Structure formats: structure tokens, C-alpha cells
């Protein structure tokens, strides 16, 4: 690899690091700006959770996808499948699933940073130290649920992540 190849690789690594830091800071700023309303919203309505994950498969045909609840590595995983439609965001598919299924629900807040998922299936992370992390194909997303345009075959997921500063 020539001189330019090493430079480009180091720039890419720094870009990813800056993206992750930005995401963490956005979450912290959002939390500081909405803590009081969140505390009022969740009181008595949902259960705190640290050991749950949610997977939503986006498929043109869900007939062969195995939905349900299972335990994987000590965590309960809720699996769903939604029929693919072109041009929709992950948030659109979450709303579609919420309208179609009685065993799935979610709550969210909106801010200038976008949509922030506060609870899924009436479970919420401890808002002081945790949040629902958004994953695309088992990788932490660098954009929010309302900003990610889903491709057919994607798996969007949510797992409880710890806020780290």
C-alpha cells in the first residue's frame, strides 16, 4: 500500500471514531434536555430492562421467518418480520409493525437530533445510564431510526446499551 493508502485508512478510522463520539454526545445532550418529561412519561407504565433485545427482519416474504421470543446468551430476544416496501426508514417499519401486531409496541421522543426510542414492548432502559441502541445487520448504526433507509433483507435491531463517557 502506498503513502496515500495509509493516509486514507487513518482518515477513515478517525472518521468512525468521531462518528461514535458524536452519537454518544447527541444521546447525552438529548437526555439532559428531556429528562424531566421522560421521568413523568415512564412512571408506572413500563418496566425497566437490561436483558432484552429486539430484532425486526425486513423481508419481501415473511412466511419462512421464525418469529417469537427466545433466550440467547441470557437475554430475551423478541423476533418479528415486516414486509418490505422500498424507500422507508427503520422508524417507518417500526410504526408499521406497531399497527399490525398486538404483541409489539414502542414509544419514542422527538428532538432536533431526531427520533429517540424510549421503550419497546413496554420495556425501557434505566434512563440515567442506558438506552436502546439501534443496530443494522448486527452493527451499531451511526444514524438514527428515522434517518436509516432500510434495504430488503436488512435486520434492524435494538439492544440495551450502557451510556459511556
Image (cartoon, rainbow, N blue to C red):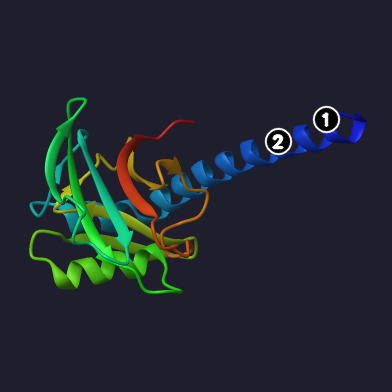
Left or right: where 34 falls relative to 102: right
Residue 77 picture location, percent across and down? 19, 40
Using the rendered image of the protein, determine whether residue 40 is visible from the camera's viewpoint: no
On residue 154, the disc is none
Residue 81 picture location, percent across and down? 23, 59
Please name whichever residue, 109 or 94, is drawn nearer the observer in this view of the structure.
94
Residue farthest to the top, as pictured: 73
Left or right: where 32 falls relative to 102: right
Residue marked by disc 2: 14
Which residue does the image show at 43% across and 53% down from the upper left? 30
Residue farthest to the right, as pictured: 3
Residue 10 in the image: above or below residue 23 = above
Residue 28 picture location, percent across and down? 45, 44
Q: CA distance from mark 1 to mark 2?
A: 12 Å
**Number of the front mark, 1 or 2:** 1
Badge 2 local density, few (<14 within 10 Å), some, or many (20+)?
few
Residue 148 in the image: above or below residue 74 = below
Using the rendered image of the protein, determine whether residue 91 is visible from the camera's viewpoint: yes
Which residue does the image show at 21% across and 25% down from the upper left? 73
Which residue does the image show at 23% across and 62% down from the upper left? 62
Q: Are marks 1 and 2 in contact (CB under 8 Å)?
A: no
Residue 32 in the image: above or below residue 110 = above
**Quarter of the N terminus within the rendering:** top right
Q: Earlier in the sequence, mark 1 or mark 2?
A: 1
Which image quarter: residue 103? bottom left
Residue 112 picture location, percent across and down? 49, 65
Please name whichever residue, 10 or 118, is drawn nearer the observer in this view of the structure.
10
Badge 1 local density, few (<14 within 10 Å), some, or many (20+)?
few
Badge 2 element: helix
Badge 1 element: helix
Residue marked by disc 1: 6
Which residue does the image show at 30% across and 41% down from the upper left? 159
Amino acid at each position: 500500500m502506498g503513502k496515500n493508502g495509509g493516509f486514507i485508512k487513518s482518515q477513515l478510522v478517525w472518521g468512525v471514531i468521531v462518528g461514535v463520539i458524536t452519537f454518544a454526545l447527541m444521546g447525552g445532550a438529548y437526555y439532559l434536555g428531556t429528562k424531566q418529561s421522560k421521568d413523568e412519561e415512564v412512571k408506572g407504565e413500563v418496566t425497566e430492562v437490561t436483558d432484552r433485545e429486539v430484532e425486526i427482519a425486513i423481508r419481501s416474504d415473511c412466511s419462512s421467518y421464525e418469529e417469537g421470543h427466545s433466550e440467547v446468551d441470557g437475554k430475551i430476544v423478541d423476533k418479528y418480520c415486516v414486509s418490505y416496501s422500498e424507500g422507508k426508514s427503520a422508524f417507518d417499519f417500526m410504526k408499521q409493525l406497531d399497527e399490525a401486531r398486538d404483541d409489539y409496541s414502542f414509544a419514542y421522543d422527538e428532538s432536533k437530533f431526531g427520533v429517540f426510542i424510549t421503550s419497546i414492548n413496554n420495556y425501557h432502559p434505566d434512563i440515567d445510564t442506558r438506552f436502546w441502541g439501534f443496530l443494522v445487520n448486527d452493527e451499531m448504526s451511526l444514524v438514527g431510526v428515522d434517518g436509516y433507509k432500510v434495504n430488503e433483507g436488512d435486520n434492524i435491531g435494538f439492544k440495551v446499551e450502557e451510556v459511556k463517557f
